[in-house]
Amino acid sequence: MKFFIDTANIAEIRDAASLGIIDGCTTNPTLLSKEKGSYREILKEICEIISGPVSAEVVSMDAEGMVKEGKELCKIADNIIIKVPCIREGIKALAMFKKEGIQTNATLCFSANQGLIVAKAGATYVSPFVGRIDDVGNSGMDLIRELVQIYNNYSFGTQIIVSSVRHPQHVYEAALTGADVATIPFKVLEQLIKHPLTDAGVKSFLADWDKVTKK
Ligand code: E4P
């Protein structure tokens, strides 16, 4: 399973990358709006830190505009992936990007049918938002399971990025489904590593080793 870091914060991205387990990064307009500086400079810096795919989202609402914007974003770095919303014009844009050989991430996916359609349109990745689905009282992870099955049934090449991850449970459940990628906020990445029994164990081993060396 690949791990992407879900932030546009350079300090967090550097810290996460230093772990050696980060395969890519996802941004969106909201994440970029929280950072200082030009979005192009931020994306450029992210692409210098992360060698894998870095998602950057278009904000045009028509297919031609999305493609034009996407091509501009692609000039920032070779590893930019164009994020396109799962709307009618987005479907057209996904097919147009595919023809141009530009990799895409179909974002704001909330149903299996949307996932099916974007796979047919040739999306490289699909981003189902599990946290936001849970927020409205449904099961985000059920959608992941459905998409894994649908993509397996028809051997679609679209990779599933479990998105809108809110806690470690989302990551472990995503791994059980066989989803390709989880995009993880920095805070959740830190939570994944920590376990109180590990901390207690390290503390007692160090204390006991101290006795050994003082013998
Ligand atoms: C990632 O690609 C998504 O934009 C992100 O995970 C959305 O997360 P949120 O629902 O917490 O805003």
Image: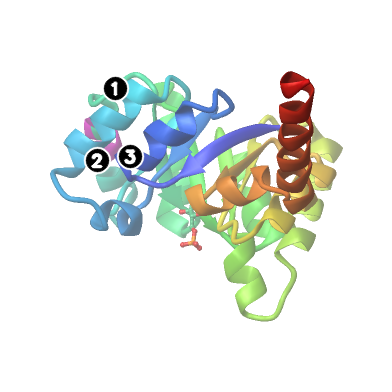
Kindly report the distance in space between the C-alpha atoms of the residues bearing marks 2 and 1. 14 Å
Kindly report the distance in space between the C-alpha atoms of the residues bearing marks 3 and 2. 27 Å
At a point 77% along the width and 48% down the height, the residue shown is 172
At a point 43% along the width and 21% down the height, the residue shown is 101
Could you tell me how many numbered marks the image carries?
3
Residue type, mark 1 in image: Ala
Mark 1: secondary structure: loop
Residue 9: image quadrant is top left
Mark seen at residue 11: 3
Q: In front: mark 3 or mark 2? A: 3
| Whether residue 147 can be seen here | no
Which residue range is magenta in the image? 67-72
Foreground: 28 or 103? 28
Foreground: 212 or 172? 212
Which quadrant of the figure contains the C terminus? top right
Q: Give the crowd class for mark 1: few <14, some 14-19, many >=20 residues within 10 Å.
A: some
Residue 151: image quadrant is top right
Which quadrant of the figure contains the N terminus? top right
Is 39 left or right of 134, judged from the image as shown? left
Residue type, mark 3 in image: Ala
Q: Residue furthest front?
A: 215
Residue 2 in magenta stretch:
no
Foreground: 166 or 123? 166
Q: Which residue is mark 2?
A: 69
Is 211 left or right of 190, judged from the image as shown? right
Judge: label 1 CB < 8 Å from ligand 1: no
Residue 148 percent coordinates (x, y): 79, 44
Q: Which residue is mark 1?
A: 77
Judge: label 3 CB < 8 Å from ligand 1: no
Kindly report the distance in space between the C-alpha atoms of the residues bearing marks 1 and 3. 20 Å
Residue 136 percent coordinates (x, y): 62, 80
